[in-house]
Image: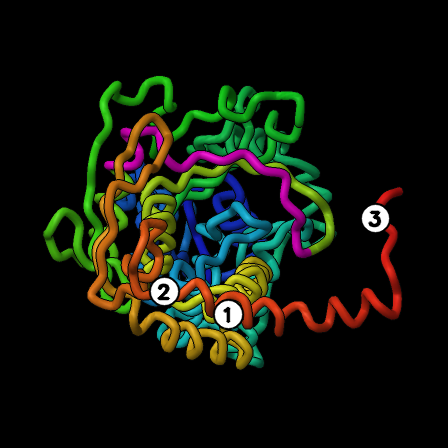
Amino acid sequence: MSNCVLAYSGGLDTSVILAWLRDLGHDVHCVYVDLGQPCEDRQAILEKAEKMGAKSSRIVDVREELCRDFAFPVLAWQARYEGIYLLGTSIARPLISKACLQVAKEVGADSFVHGATGKGNDQCRFQLAAEALEPEVNMIAPWRIKEFRELFPGRTEMIAYCNERDIPVKASVEKPYSSDENCLHISYEAGRLEELTQNGYDIVDFGMTVSPQEAPDQKETITLGFEHGVPVRLNGQTLSPLAMVEQLNTIGGRNGVGRIDIVENRFVGMKSRGVYEAPGMTVLYEAHRLLEQLTLDRDLVHLRDRLAPEVAEMVYYGLWYVPKMDALMAMMRETQRPVTGEVTLDLYKGNLMVSSRTSPNSLYDAEVASMEGGGSYNQDDAEGFLRIMGLPSRVQGKVHPRPYDD
């Protein structure tokens, strides 16, 4: 039997997996990777693991690292999977693998266990990250083991198993959706959310945001300061990455900012429905985008926008510790050098509206852009510019006339 490390959340899946592994005689070291999960009693989670027979249990606090070294670089890329998802779950998985492998070395464990299913994305993220860091790592994924699936065909059987053994879990037969929480967001899936005719916002008990209808009837104004693309100040106060995210979660959450309901394409090929809330990161993405409008030139922004979906896809798939990502992050650091300044936003009932933006590196020149008379732009220059730009079209039009009166 193995001496293994389990990425342990204390939720339904990992609680069942811990009990199952113990029944098989494995020594299990439970690692609760603290990603800033809200609404959780961490000490109670460790105590539950120990009561269930874990060889050891510990908390590894990576909250600051998650924000600083994972979320903020992805923010700088403006990376959104399929144009909307801010990757709050995806970006945490490589860090969980890293933390668990570090513990495995300390306790002499020979296997890394995770609770991701064989249908989902997380199995890819955990394994691809772990194998990049430890090529010889032994992965145990119970959901990909036939005997485990025969015992637990679905969440109903897992809930019944926990009830029989007095294992406390939040999931229930009446509301069996699954949630994943960290300081960046909360995701919700499964259960009644699999019924696309059901309104996801009505089903979910949101933990970070109020509904826009229940948000205050007056706007709240905030000012964010960035240095080289990194958010560093909120309303004039210098904050660490974690403190920045946490405070913006509170501010954005009380103003109903950051909820989405999407049907996304998983890495393994199927479509799945998820509801997400990410108030703080939603505010940061918008403020960062507005500042880039001032500080980055057109061609660089357009190149970044073409590559951002590639970055988002790699994060979503779990390809974090790969040379291609290293190269893309090096490019990101270069593009962000001039992205310094302040953005003031008004938050109102789920909406984000720009109030002002300033930067010492602003490329906006009112003398050039002004629609008023005078200024430093010579409109006569446009004649030659357009004659040159239109040359290929004129040549093509003479050789291959295009009908335009059909």
* Circle 3 residue: 404
Q: Is residue 109 above or below residue 259?
A: below
User: Amino acid type of disc 3?
Assistant: Tyr
Q: Residues within 10 Å of mark 1 (few under 14, many from 20)?
A: many
Residue type (three-letter) at the residue carrying disc 2: Tyr
Picture layout, residue 397 above or below residue 403: below
Circle 2 sits on which residue? 377
Mark 3–mark 2 contact, CB under 8 Å? no
Among numbered discs 3 and 2, the one appearing first in the sequence: 2
- The residue shown at (25%, 21%) is 216
Q: For residue 181, say whether it is visible.
A: yes
Location of the C terminus (image quadrant): top right
Q: Residue 335: x and y, percent?
A: 39, 73
Helix, strand or loop status at disc 1: loop
Q: Quadrant of residue 289?
A: bottom left
Identified by mark 1, the residue type is: Trp
Relative horizontal placement of residue 80, taking residue 349 as reference (left or right): right
On the image, the x and y values in percent for residue 200 come to: 54, 26
Q: Is residue 126 left or right of residue 339?
A: right
Q: What residue sits right under mark 1 in the picture?
A: 320
At label 3, counting other C-alpha atoms closer than 10 Å, the crowd grade (few under 14, some 14-19, many 20 or more) is few
